Amino acid sequence: MDQNTFTQVVYDDDEIRVIWHPGQTDFVLITFGDLITPAQGHRYFADKPAHKADIAALGIVAKSANWYPAGHVLRAYEAISPLIKDYPVKVAYGGSMGGYAAIKFSRLFGATHVIALCPQWSLDLAECEGINPGWQEHVRPDMTGMGIRAADIHGEVFLFVDRLNPMDMFHCRMIIRAFGGAEVINVPCVGHNVTSVFAGTNNLLALIAACRARDIPALRLFVRRTRRNYPLWREKLIAAAIARFPKASYGRLIEHAYRDRSIMRQNPRYMAGALTYRARSHGRGGAITFYHDFRDLLDPMEQMKLCAQLCRIAQTTPMLETVHGTALIYDLTHGICSHKKSCEDVTEYCVKLEMSGGFAALYVLIGDARFYLLRDSRDSISTPPMAGDRRSPFGFEVEATGGGTFALKDRDVYLTAEPGGKIIGNRKSASIWERFSFGVQA
């Protein structure tokens, strides 16, 4: 159903818009939008969970990064106050710029509870005691003296902030100075992303219920539960742990990654360290297994780097692997490439790949000499003749094909590893046999 059929714009001017959603709750939720969600149609902050839970909601949305000019909010209140005056419980709710407004206008709206996520106190440098409060690119002349005062505040105030974030904690301390009765709930290791951590219908209902009951233990439990499901929190926690306790933390990272692969997907920069740790703790075979278990999470360039790291610490040889589990091999006797499980003769060499940006060169090392490979007139892959082929060796375009694989394209055709062992360069599109990855000789 179109949300416009059960919401109504009840106030609109050049700075803010107010949307009304009648619901079946015994309280009204008054939300203030943040900086990144300006007014658009009937959308407002927390609209989806409010509609899903059938919450009576008044959505106040800014049309720009204006931090809700007081005169416009006052005019809006005068127009819409009849809609909310009979609700005994009024919950003001917002994050960042919206968190500022939820506190700043809590007395105006008669809020009984205020839920402010990483709110600002003021952006006016003149009243910030020499501290840069951030967001200065959005400051306007009419924001002078915009700081939250005790006279602005009404109801029970709950501030959710990451105590490790210096800027957010500055604003938090200034709000506490203005209103000492505010309850501060720490949401560690999420930065200025508390709003994203708390997203969702069940989270909104749990948050409101705990604040209405002033159940601080329940709120702290709520924070622990929600942040554990938030990828950024896990990334920051892992980064902090690895920086402080690298040896122990890489083991824990690997342990968690095998239970939840998304952890490693979100932290690919730790892959090389984890691989090295695995080699030390589980030997060469453990490192190779770890690489094959997680290489599909990496793009071609990052996979090539990790493969090179594996070859260094496991003292093995890299190979260009096909979807058949075979390696690209150059046969010095016949002068062309094929694919098979391993080199079976002293005249066979694993094909290697060198990448520059999105392009690659294929080559083989014979002794200390490097020989580049190109697609020839027979659509085979071979070394160019002495007569001369002026093409750059970096003539293969690398196209990521998902799952850690990639295709190699020479002008308009792709390399194909046919089931019988042939390597042909004549396919017009990339399907299964055209997929390659970086592997190592066992």
Image (cartoon, helix red, strand yellow):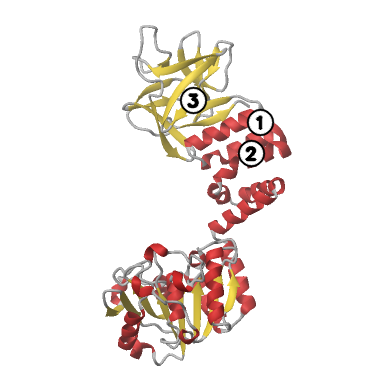
User: Which comes sooner in the sequence, label 3 or label 1?
Assistant: 1
Q: Position of residue 261 (x, y in %)?
A: 57, 49
Q: Position of residue 347 (x, y in %)?
A: 55, 10
Choose top left, top right, bottom left or bottom right for residue 94: bottom left
Q: 216 or 282: which is nearer to us?
A: 216
Q: Is residue 60 visible?
A: yes
Gap between marks 1 and 2, in whole Å?
A: 9 Å
Q: Which residue is mark 3?
A: 353
Q: Secondary structure at mark 3?
A: strand
Q: Which residue is mark 2?
A: 275
Q: Which residue is mark 1?
A: 313
Name which residue type carries label 2. Leu
Q: Does 34 appear above or below 214?
A: above
> Disc 1, disc 2: CB below 8 Å?
yes
Q: Image check: 323 left or right of 239? A: left
Q: 249 or 403: which is nearer to us?
A: 249
- Characterize the local packing of mark 1: few (<14), some (14-19) or many (20 or more) Cα atoms within 10 angstroms: some
User: Which comes sooner in the sequence, label 3 or label 2?
Assistant: 2
Please give the name of the residue rendered at 68% of the width and 39% of the height, measured from the top-left corner. Answer: 278
- Characterize the local packing of mark 2: few (<14), some (14-19) or many (20 or more) Cα atoms within 10 angstroms: many
Please give the name of the residue rendered at 56% of the width and 80% of the height, measured from the top-left corner. Answer: 182
Q: Position of residue 178 (x, y in %)?
A: 53, 81
Q: Does 379 appear above or below 232?
A: above
User: Which comes sooner in the sequence, label 1 or label 2?
Assistant: 2
Q: Secondary structure at mark 1?
A: helix
